Image (cartoon, helix red, strand yellow):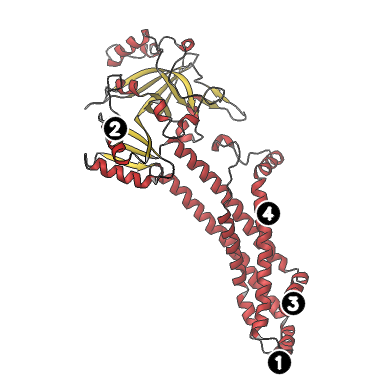
Amino acid sequence: MYKYLLCWRYLKTRYIALASVISVMLGVATMIVVNAVMAGFSGTMRDRLHGILADIVVESYDLDGFYDWREVQSIIQDDCGDQVAATAPTMETFGLLKIYLPNGEAVTRQVMVIGIRPEDRAKTGDFSEFVQDESGKPVKPSFDVPKAWQTHSPAGHLLADTPKDDPLHEILAQQAAEQVPDRGAILGYALATIHRPGTTSDDFIAPEGAKIGLAFPKAGRKPEAAYDDYTVVGFFKSGMSEYDSMHVYVPLERLQYMRMLGDGAGNGAVNQIQVQVKPGVDMNVVAERIQRALDSRRPGYFRVATWEEKQGPLLEAVRIEQFILNVLLFLIIAVAGFGILAIFSMIVVEKTRDIGVLKALGASNGGVRGIFLSYGLALSVVGCGAGMIEGLLIVHYLNDIERAINSLTGTRVFNPDIYYFSEIPTHIDPWTVAGVVLGAIMIAVTASVWPAQRASKLHPVQAIRFE
């Protein structure tokens, strides 16, 4: 009983121990806040990346793709039909985008042109959730062009700059006279807008109904440029700038036709098949089964990868960053442990005569050792408990704190224009919080072992005579 009474007395009177409590508290709170923010960013990023891609992507190594994609879909259904929810044929190719401005000028950007069937693509991921209109309202993915937006092709803008002996001149001349009632395109939000510093809204350079031109390579032994006009009918805003600034979605049949890979009526090649598995199914197992089934028919032609494998470098970079941050923050708690070691060593020196009296009155070595171990445990529990409460409160009010700092300093701590998040995303994992608290307690208690052992080995007579 005397061990706990002395431990409680030391807690009330040894104010220097508050330094240990504060150091442990700050270390635990910092680890909880950083882990919550990193988990929030990582989780939000993973959700958006997964929404852009289906669970599994079957693609050919040849950019021109394969014509027997319906047979490939049948193979997937025959081999994994009970585990596959939907499939969607896709054609991807690099290209150049021309945005025609009202003043007669044009903006050129490098893009990824993606041919899809909206109704199929909406079944293989969150694509439909990312499509919106000019006001930001979600809309059903479609390439239908309203009659009010159907105008003559803007290909005529390029005729003046194209020599007559250029093969592209004849194509542009034909397209300049035709109308485009059925060639809509869904444009990446960052491609269609310009954000001006100091403003809270974006200016559209390619609003709904705007005319754009796309140039991309045709198939064949000698690649040539193909050019086609489209009308902007929607915007793709995933929140990932890498995709919002690169992706342009167009009708699959039209892209096949313009690349000389189809007849424009659905009989053409694709270079990807997006596969969505059913809930609860291990997509890695399904991907391996699809790979084996396709390799048995056409070895080395297809690459089957899950969305995580497709985004592997980015996800791995985030994981390594989170791991390194945790290591550095645990070193902060380790510094607090050395502080506890120094303070306890000083207390043992100051209480040498008291320890001698206790041992002369019959206290055992284990009893003296228990006093300081209990003291270290109490300090660590108080510090970790306070740090956990502080960390959880900071996470809960993090966005309010960010806004307060913004108003006080006049600078943006968290710029949503960079991260595409309206608020700082956070996620509290109870197991992570428990691991941080238990780890900090172990470090603090371990730091008190050596001073406690030193106190327990003091000889009573020598301790009493200590000056």
Residue 390: give its label.
4
Q: Residues within 10 Å of mark 4 (few under 14, many from 20)?
A: some
Location of residue 299 (image quadrant): top left
Secondary structure beneath disc 3? helix
What type is the residue that disc 1 sits on? Val
Of marks 4 and 1, the one in the foreground: 4
Query: How far apart are the two marked residues, 3 and 4, measured between alpha carbons?
Result: 29 Å
Residue 278: give its label.
none
Check whether the beta carbons of the residues at disc 4 and disc 1 lie within 8 A of each other.
no
Q: Residue at x 30, y 22 (%)?
A: 266
Depicted 27 relative to depicted 296: above or below: below
Query: How far apart are the two marked residues, 3 and 2, measured between alpha carbons?
Result: 77 Å
Residue 63: give its label.
2
Which residue corresponds to mark 3? 6
Query: How far apart are the two marked residues, 1 and 2, measured between alpha carbons?
Result: 88 Å
Visible in this render: residue 65?
Answer: no
Secondary structure beneath disc 1? helix
Sequence-wise, which precedes: disc 3 or disc 2? 3
Check whether the beta carbons of the residues at disc 3 and disc 1 lie within 8 A of each other.
no
Which residue corresponds to mark 1? 461
Of marks 3 and 2, the one in the foreground: 3
What type is the residue that disc 3 sits on? Leu
Location of residue 309 (image quadrant): top left
Q: Residue furthest bottom?
A: 461
Query: How far apart are the two marked residues, 4 and 1, measured between alpha carbons?
Result: 46 Å
Q: Residues within 10 Å of mark 2 (few under 14, many from 20)?
A: some
